[in-house]
Amino acid sequence: MTSNRPYLIRALFDWILDNGMTPHLLVDAESPGVFVPRSYIDDGRIVLNVAPSAVHGLVIGNDAVRFSARFGGVAHQVEIPPGAVLGIYARENGHGMLFPDEDPGAAEDQTVPTDSEPSDSTEAKPKRPSLRVVK
C-alpha cells in the first residue's frame, strides 16, 4: 500500500483551518527532494507556516507539498516530499500530529498471511467462543 502520510497531512491541514488555527509543518530539511530556503534551516529542520494567508498556490499532493512563500521579503518555491514532513500542528495550541519515521522497504517486506495459505497442522485450534446467560 502507499503511504498514508499525504492523506493525513491534508486531513489535519483542513482540521486545523476548520478550527480557526494556523497550520505549521515541521520538515526534515536534510531529506532528499526537500527544496526550502537553506538560510532558514535550524538543526536540520524547518518550520513552515502553511496558512492560506502565508503561502500561494499550496498543493498537498501524494508526491509532494508545493507552494510559494516569502522568506524575508523574497519569494521562494518550496517543495517537500511527504516523507520529509515530520509533523503538522496548530501554532496557537500545538495540537496536531507528529509522524513516525517511515522505512520505505518495510511495507514491501511485510506479508500478511491469508486464509488460502496452508496452516501448520500441529497448531492447536482455538476454542470457539460461546455465550451463556448469567443471572
Image: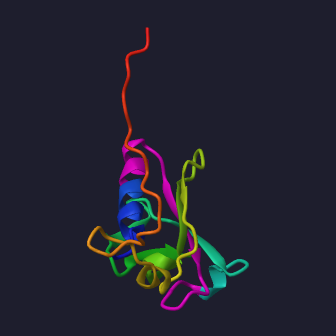
Q: Residue at x 42, y 68 (%)?
A: 5
Protein image colouring: rainbow
Q: Position of residue 2 (x, y in %)?
A: 34, 76
Against 35, is 124 above or below? above
| Residue 51 makes an appearance in the image | yes
Q: Residue at x 48, y 75 (%)?
A: 70
Q: Position of residue 79 (x, y in %)?
A: 43, 83
In the displayed structure, does residue 80 sit left or right of residue 27?
left
Q: Residue at x 65, y 85 (%)?
A: 39
Q: Nearer the viewer, residue 116 or 124?
A: 124
Q: Position of residue 50 (x, y in %)?
A: 45, 64
Against 53, is 92 above or below? above
**Residue farthest to the front?**
122
**Which image quarter holds the N terminus?**
bottom left
**Residue farthest to the top?**
135
**Residue farthest to the bottom?**
32
Q: Position of residue 90 (x, y in %)?
A: 53, 51
Q: Which residues are magenta?
A: 14-37
Occupied quadrant, residue 131: top left
Q: Nearer the viewer, residue 124 or 7?
A: 124
**Which image quarter holds the C terminus?**
top left
Asked whether residue 87 is drawn in magenta, I would say: no
**Residue farthest to the left?**
116
Q: Nearer the viewer, residue 115 or 36?
A: 115
